[in-house]
Amino acid sequence: MTIYGTGLLAACVLAGLFVGDLLGSAIGVKANVGGVGFAMILLIFSSEYLRKRGWLPQPTKEGVQFWSAIYIPVVVAMAAQQNVVAALKGGPAAILAGVLAVVVCFALIPAVERIGKEKRTEPFRPQAVTE
Amino acid sequence: MEKLILDVLTKNGMLTGFAVVALTMLLSNWLSARFTRGRLHGSAIAIMLGLALAYVSGVFTGGQKGVADMPMLAGVGLIGGAMIRDFAITATAFGVHLGEIRKAGVSGVVSLFAGVILSFVVGAAVAAAFGYDDAVSMATIGAGAVTYIVGPVTGAAIGASSDVMALSIAAGLVKSILVMVATPFFARTIHLDNPRTAMVFGGMMGTTSGVCGALAAIDPKLVPYGAMTSTFYTGLGCLMGPSVLFLATQALVG
């Protein structure tokens, strides 16, 4: 049944958010620390487990896939309720802080992206090390 | 008659929301195909339309929640609100391959720390340049440049004034909106077309709304990878902002 999939998804989100809140209060911040991340990991592992046992028929999958497909419209709805006026009213300091943070981090993505890759190719290029 | 229609729309807010969002998507996809030959993705246009509508209604209503401040469109707030948003983001993980996540490994973790610390330093430096040069204000605005959630969390923990808090949230909002709107234009220059880079992107930029909005516009298949690292980013920011980063700022400026 389709609702089984939606139920599995809901259970994962609730459990993840609970862990996030727990972690938040444990370290003394009033925020959910990585809750959605935990929920995603839970969903990945639980669906993998169910798939291997053959307990994940098409209708059940559809109960999750619908929400995954509705994601972009949800983002559009989210964009439509941002406090854009406040963002622009914050003045040059806020705008500059935001813009510079984006520019600096964006520029460094290729460098950080290379980190793990270099490690893997190292054994194949011993000459490069001795040079 | 008119009142009757408005009543139905207001009473069934969430359904109105679905219809309005669907219309926005339809219009955006048409604009994308007609005027950009699909080069600028329909979702990117829809997000920009959403932000523009949020601005217009913010000006008219004086509220803080964009179109959701208009009673008839309160349902849009429900659809894009925290509950459905978390539900839908998590659902995108359904198509994730574990192997891809392992591949990101070290660079994923490095990107998280680099992203949080760099954004904080840049934000704090800008704050100091504009005269907010005490440790509390610098740390709060720096944390705002991390994300608009980390900003107020940090500010509240270290006792920042409300105007500094507002500034910090504004910095985070600017970041989120800029990431959403600008990334699709620069995606090719940083080869943002694979799960690995998407995870690093999520870890470096962090703002979940910005990252997911941008990836949705570039390639919806990449959304879960960026979403995963970016949700940990906000967590890491909340953890480091009021503690290590604030203490370091204090040690530096006294």
Image (cartoon, helix red, strand yellow):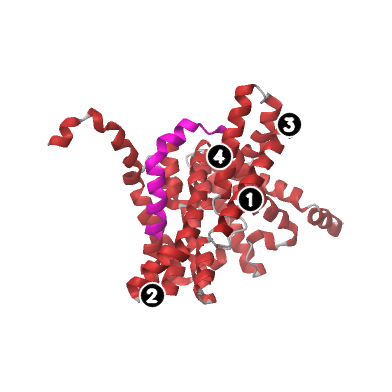
Return the x and y of residue A60 as percentages of the image width and height: 70, 29
User: Does the rendering let one see residue A74?
Assistant: no
Q: Tag 1's secondary structure?
A: helix
Magenta part mainly helix, strand or loop?
A: helix
Amino acid type shown at disc 1: Phe
Residue A2, labelled with which disc?
A: 3
Residues B244 and B119: in front is B244
Amino acid type shown at disc 4: Ile
Residue at the spot of label 2: B130
Q: Name the quarter where the C terminus of chain B is drawn.
A: bottom left
Chain to which the residue tagged by mark 2 belongs: B
Q: CA distance from mark 3 to mark 1?
A: 25 Å
Q: Is residue B123 left or right of residue B87?
A: left
Q: CA distance from mark 3 to mark 4?
A: 21 Å
* Marks 3 and 4, the one that precedes in the sequence: 3
Q: CA distance from mark 2 to mark 1?
A: 40 Å
